[in-house]
Amino acid sequence: GAGVSQSPRYKVAKRGQDVALRCDPISGHVSLFWYQQALGQGPEFLTYFQNEAQLDKSGLPSDRFFAERPEGSVSTLKIQRTQQEDSAVYLCASLKVAGSYEQYFGPGTRLTVT
Amino acid sequence: GQQVMQIPQYQHVQEGEDFTTYCNSSTTLSNIQWYKQRPGGHPVFLIQLVKSGEVKKQKRLTFQFGEAKKNSSLHITATQTTDVGTYFCALLRNAGNMLTFGGGTRLMVKP
């Protein structure tokens, strides 16, 4: 498929566990974004990569959240010591080139922390 | 930073009725985007508006950007059950291209 893919689609974690969420952007897309969407809310920006460089991580809610994109394609969002308030859908989006404006979203990973 | 507020939060309509959602800001916006998210789905880009007073149409959907560039609207004519979902407006930030989303309007259509 040509779209953005994310895995796993669903993740249940016990409070205190670490989780890793993966995003495969559209091939060749330069920019990659992570958003967090709480139930009934709009997505909120977490962090942004241009190629392998993380240019903005101002939206990460705490130092338990960490993202990487080491080779400029696949990205991983890691959450350490998960808390109940981390329960949300984590959306990844990619953008073809800087300056273009249509972001393509993946299906998201629904994280439930029990 | 800049925020965008959407109203209403929810809207129930009978199939065939029209629907409008509004997006407002206290400051001048450089652009506004609209996304649709089906239940259980992900946001899908609909359109971007950048010019004062701009009006764009996509079949039964009409998008407007206010003259002062502080508000925008999405109007759906003669809703269909396929229009069900949450409609978000979003501001594309110039530095970094990240999106700031409004809270969304959830549209429910009764057949």
Image (cartoon, rainbow, N blue to C red):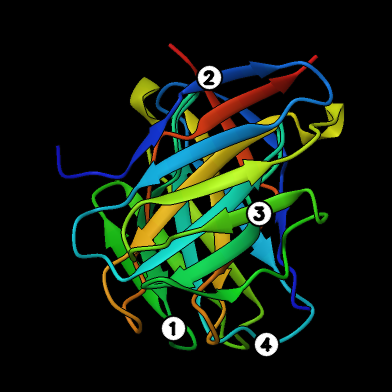
> The disc labelled 2 sits on which kind of residue?
Tyr
Name the image quarter holding the N terminus of chain A: top left
- Callout 2: 10 Å neighbours few (<14), some, many (20+)? some
Image quadrant where residue A63 sits: bottom right
Q: Which mark is residue A10?
A: 2
Q: Which residue is mark 4?
A: B28
**Which circle, 1 or 2, is nearer the viewer?**
2
The residue that mark 3 highlights is A66
Of badges 3 and 4, the one in the foreground is 3
> Label 1: which residue?
B50
- Distance between the alpha carbons at the discs numbered 4 and 2: 39 Å
- Hey, what amino acid is under mark 4? Thr
**SS for dot 2:** strand
Separation of marks 1 and 2 at Cα, in angstroms: 37 Å
Query: Which circle, 4 or 2, is nearer the viewer?
Result: 2
Residue at 44% over, 60% down = A69
Q: CA distance from mark 1 to mark 3?
A: 34 Å
Of marks 4 and 1, which one's residue comes earlier in the chain?
4
* Residue B47 showing in the rendered view: yes
Question: B111 and A75: which one is in front?
Answer: A75
Pinpoint residue B51: horizontal percent, then vertical percent: 43, 87
Residue type at numbered disc 3: Phe
Which subunit holds the residue at mark 4?
A: B
Q: Are marks 1 and 2 in contact (CB under 8 Å)?
A: no
The kind of secondary structure element at disc 1 is: loop
A9 sits left or right of B28 in the view: left
